[in-house]
Amino acid sequence: MKTTPFTRYHVENGARMAEFAGYHMPIEFTGINDEHCAVRERAGVFDVSHMGEIWVKGPRAAEFLQYVTTNDIRALRDGKVQYSCLPNGRGGIVDDILIYRIDAGTFLLVVNASNVGKDWSHLVAQGEKFEMRPGRELYDASDEIAQLAVQGPLAMRIVQRLCPERVENLEYYTFVKTEVAGIGNAILSATGYTGAGGCEIYVAAKDAPRLWDALWRAGAEYGLQNIGLGARDTLRLEMGFCLYGNDIDDTTSPVEAGLGWITKPVDGNDFIDRPLFEVQKKEGTERRLVGFELTERGIPRHGYALAAPDGRTIGAVTSGTMSPTLKKGIGMGYVQSAFAAPGTDIDVVIRNKPVRARVVKMPFLKRREAE
């Protein structure tokens, strides 16, 4: 298994470690519920150095990205981040990604750890017609970059103590290149995968120990905690964020996955699979990804069948958990479109027993706070 620049700290701190996307990663430290609540109430730090980073550069970089991604790259300006996906030419998703615009000819793609090799091969193959050459205009920097995510309502107070310029009120889906913990040329962004606020910090792998030590000194008085992948999953699910390999993959279209908002068939945006997705947006799809809450006791899990009240199978759970915040079972899954409207009653089949649930509008947590 691969390790990250922070792996030894996780082991020293008593993490329960396991393989994830080929990496030796921390699953939990003090327990998933405890870590989850720490992020919702204070601040937590996640090692996300397993994520991939690919540079796209040159005079045709924007033109290339406009073709290989579904969003409209023209909406980006320097210092902005865009959520998008790579269509595979067969109506599915190679990966969902973040695009950082450094300048008009320089972009950083942040991709899922399990997909780095696949994404790289796809980009290289598609790049030939745009003269985007591997090692030149396309460069995989994944092994050279360390990344920590600091999340929670107190996260930016902690990170501000490491930065000479004002970053505490960094706008959502923007970034700055700045000094962090005395490390120059770091990237500090505000995208997040928890819905609790905070930022991501990118530094050269060689600078990882310096960042780690400084962050924990700054966070001590704020109750900063280590957070593993277990709580990362429950946090993202409460916000209705898709997880590649569970909720989206090479067989799901962004339209049926509820990602029509990043699928933009507008003038001048002739991306891969545009004709198909344009039809799907206009005419609908046979199935749709929905969120649901259990109205009876139970915990939905990936792969469980979803059924209509009359017992007919209508889909399957893609992600599910007992929400530490809501204190009830929540999940996501694909269902026949006739059962996708919020308020629709469906059943989750748990150990051959139907357990009643209700389709709800995501995110789960925001919906609850608004009630």
Image (cartoon, rainbow, N blue to C red):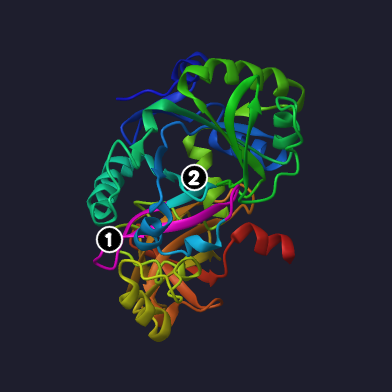
Q: Amino acid type of disc 2?
A: Asp
Mark 1 sits on what residue? 88
Relative to 18, residue 311 above or below: below
Q: Is residue 312 visible?
A: no
Residue stretch in magenta: 77-96
Residue visible at 27% across and 40% down?
Answer: 134
Q: Is residue 261 magenta?
A: no
Relative to 304, residue 321 above or below: above
Q: Nearer the viewer, residue 174 or 91?
A: 174
| Side (left or right) of 132 relative to 243 | left
Relative to 312, residue 59 above or below: above
Q: Nearer the viewer, residue 197 or 264?
A: 264
Specify the label residue 11 is tagged with.
none
The residue most toward the bottom is: 283
Q: Amino acid type of disc 1?
A: Asn
Residue 76 percent location from the top left of the image: 55, 57
Tag 2–tag 1 contact (CB < 8 Å): no
Relative to 187, residue 296 above or below: below
The residue most toward the front is: 59
Q: Quadrant location of the N terminus?
A: top left
Residue visible at 53% across and 39% down?
Answer: 231
- Tell how many labels: 2
Q: Secondary structure at mark 2?
A: helix
Residue visible at 70% across and 35% down?
Answer: 155
The earlier-in-sequence mark between 2 and 1 is: 1
Q: Secondary structure at mark 1?
A: loop
Residue 37 percent location from the top left of the image: 65, 40
Mark 2 sits on what residue? 233
